[in-house]
């Protein structure tokens, strides 16, 4: 699973890591129970601060995507709690994306087919 | 003896420049990941562009080939001439110039490729980096069981040398008691082995490259590369331990005729062979994986002349080299800046040392009797022996029967100067060994000197004067 970091992006690096790990879990590239690299190893490999990776892992843990313990490090949760609802922040983000699509002339059908494609492939 | 130095320098230089040529100047650029340190983009293979890349590579490769041929011919001439005046200076300066000059066509090629890229509207991905989460910390090839044994052999040579120097072990040839020469030589060689091992460990833990979206391809590619690197480093440590450590120890302790210089010669040949094998395997790996390289990170702008990495956003100190073998430092890293400064300083210092050696070689020593003193003089060094203190003198017509072991000072083919052990006796030496003659002076206080002038005539004249005075 490849993580692409853009240092010049407005999105903080820890959030980029978090987002891509979430996408990796969703797409099945990262399976339940799979070991994640240690904070130090990942930071060294990416050439970033350990605090940045630690922050991403903390966030993933709080959101229930990964579990961590001293002995085994970080692992993907085998069962991720399914709330069945979209969070407020994601709703806002989705609203922004839909708005931008509408303004740039993307049809609703195209947008829905894209969602179908992503949702369908990744489910 | 005279040609050994030339042979060693020849062995060091000629294979090095040809290995550099094979590594830096690709003949089939389409099979390579990088062309003169510039990422080989798929756009380069398009019709019209491909010809331009062909032209750049052909021109640069030809320039490098010409340079290499010239340097090889000069090296052969220097080797054949053998006994040149100031040959240490000439050889070392020549090696410096040749290795530096070899990178000039590469830097020019890099500039031209970057210009071509710009003209095609291609740019580097600024601030983008890829990491394969599945290869982080999992791709390791260096095994402790492989790197430890040669270091143990190296450590054993140090222990044996120390025991021999302390006279705990009696050896037939050890003729330099008190100098700890064997311990110093074996200890240095052992430390080189430890340094290679530490470097190997560091290389094994370097960032895995991302060449594809497929983690398995990334893992296999990095594993293959690290395995080759680990094998080469283990081989280097073995060569270091056996050929340098053991041969030096045999030579020093048993004076068996297997000279240390011959050992160094074999050592250099094997190191070069290992390096050539490594480069060949590396190139084969690149060739095999070329078709899988679908995700190559283009960070060309972070590489100055395709050789020096400068990325302030990268917290890593070590990154894989683009030109050559192993790793290089991030010049934007605070430690990298210090290392870069020290490296520049060491280059300047090395050049000054070579110039100093040249001055030592070109300035003849002088020996004279003046105001009741025997004065040996060269550059800033002067030995003064009061004639009144001299107890006995002996004229030695051929010094080849004596064994000079340097404790401190200068030991060159044309100059021996400083504290030496001569056939087991601690002495002060100030002579031109290539002139074969010397005067052995023993003072009332028991000090022993071996001195000579720049010519046998000068030496015999001083001997005659001293004989009259005594």
Image (spheres, coloured by chain):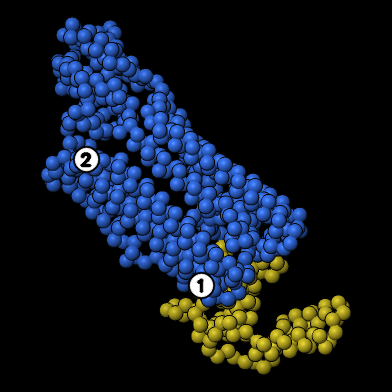
Q: The N terminus of chain B appears in which quarter of the rendering?
A: top left
Chain with colour blue in the figure: B
Return the residue nearer the eye: B419 or A72.
B419
> Pointer 2 indicates a residue of which chain?
B
> Can you tell which quarter of the image residue B419 is in?
top left
Q: Position of residue B446 (x, y in %)?
A: 15, 22
Q: Are marks 1 and 2 in contact (CB under 8 Å)?
A: no
Quick one: SS at disc 2?
Answer: loop
Q: Is residue B446 left or right of residue A10?
A: left
- Please name the color used to draw chain A: yellow
Which residue has dot 2 on it? B257
Query: Which residue is found at the position 44% from the left and 58% from the top?
Result: B278
Quick one: SS at disc 1?
Answer: helix
Look at the image and tell me whether residue A58 can be seen: yes
Q: Position of residue B9 (x, y in %)?
A: 40, 39
**First in sequence: mark 1 or mark 2?**
1
Numbered label tally: 2
Q: Does residue B434 sit above or below B253 in this rendering?
A: above
Q: Position of residue B39 (x, y in %)?
A: 63, 59
Query: Which residue is found at the position 67% from the left and 48% from the top?
Result: B111
Query: Which residue is found at the position 58% from the left and 76% from the top?
Result: B214
Which residue has dot 1 on it? B219
> Pointer 1 indicates a residue of which chain?
B
């Amino acid at each position: 699973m490849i993580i692409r970091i853009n240092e010049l992006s407005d999105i903080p690096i820890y959030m980029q890591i978090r987002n891509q790990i979430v996408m990796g879990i969703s797409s099945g590239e990262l399976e339940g129970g799979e070991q994640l690299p240690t904070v130090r190893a990942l930071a060294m490999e990416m050439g970033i601060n350990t605090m940045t990776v630690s922050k991403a892992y903390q966030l993933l843990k709080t959101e229930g995507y990964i579990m961590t313990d001293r002995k085994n490090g970080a692992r993907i949760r085998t069962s991720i709690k399914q709330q069945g609802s979209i969070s407020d922040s994601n709703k806002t983000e989705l609203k922004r994306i839909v708005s931008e699509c509408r303004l740039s002339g993307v049809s609703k059908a195209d947008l829905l087919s894209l969602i179908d494609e992503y949702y369908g492939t990744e489910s | 003896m005279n040609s050994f130095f030339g042979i060693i320098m020849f062995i060091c230089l000629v294979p090095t420049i040809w290995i550099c040529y094979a590594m830096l100047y690709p003949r089939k650029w389409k099979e390579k990941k990088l062309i003169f340190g510039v990422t080989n983009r798929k756009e380069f293979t398009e019709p019209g562009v491909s010809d331009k890349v062909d032209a750049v590579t052909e021109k640069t490769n030809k320039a490098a080939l010409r340079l290499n041929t010239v340097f090889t011919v000069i090296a052969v001439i220097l080797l054949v001439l053998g006994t040149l005046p100031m040959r240490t200076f000439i050889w070392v300066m020549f090696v410096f110039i040749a290795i530096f000059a070899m990178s000039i066509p590469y830097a020019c090629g890099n500039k031209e490729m970057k210009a071509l890229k710009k003209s095609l509207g291609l740019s580097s991905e600024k601030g983008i980096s890829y990491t394969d989460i599945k290869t982080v910390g999992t791709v390791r090839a260096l095994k402790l069981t492989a790197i430890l044994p040669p270091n143990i052999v190296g450590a054993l040579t140090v222990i044996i040398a120390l025991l021999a120097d302390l006279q705990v072990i009696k050896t037939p040839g050890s003729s330099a008691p008190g100098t700890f020469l064997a311990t110093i030589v074996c200890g240095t060689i052992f430390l080189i082995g430890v340094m290679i091992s530490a470097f190997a460990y560091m290389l094994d833990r370097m960032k895995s490259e991302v060449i594809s979206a497929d983690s398995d391809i990334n893992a296999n590619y990095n594993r293959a590369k690290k395995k080759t690197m680990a094998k080469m480093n283990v081989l280097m440590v073995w060569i270091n331990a056996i050929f340098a450590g053991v041969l030096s120890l045999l030579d020093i302790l048993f004076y068996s005729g297997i000279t240390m210089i011959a050992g160094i010669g074999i050592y250099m040949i094997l190191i070069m062979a290992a390096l050539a094998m490594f480069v060949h395997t590396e190139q084969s790996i690149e060739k095999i994986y070329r078709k899988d390289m679908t995700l190559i990170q283009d960070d060309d702008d972070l590489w100055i002349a395709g050789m020096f990495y400068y990325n302030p956003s990268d917290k890593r100190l070590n990154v894989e080299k683009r030109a050559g073998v192993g790793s290089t430092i991030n010049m934007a890293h605070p430690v990298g800046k210090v290392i870069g400064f020290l490296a520049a300083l060491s280059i300047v210092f090395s050049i000054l040392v070579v110039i100093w050696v040249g001055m030592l070689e070109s300035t003849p020593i002088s020996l004279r009797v003046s105001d009741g003193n025997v004065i040996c003089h060269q550059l800033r060094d002067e030995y003064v022996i009061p004639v009144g203190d001299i107890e006995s003198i002996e004229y030695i017509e051929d010094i080849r029967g004596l064994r000079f072991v340097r404790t401190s000072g200068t030991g060159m083919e044309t100059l021996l100067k400083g504290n030496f052990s001569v056939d087991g006796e601690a002495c002060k030496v100030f002579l031109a060994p290539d002139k074969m003659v010397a005067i052995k002076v023993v003072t009332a206080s028991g000090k022993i000197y071996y001195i000579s002038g720049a010519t046998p005539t000068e030496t015999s004249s001083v001997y005659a004067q001293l004989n009259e005075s005594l």
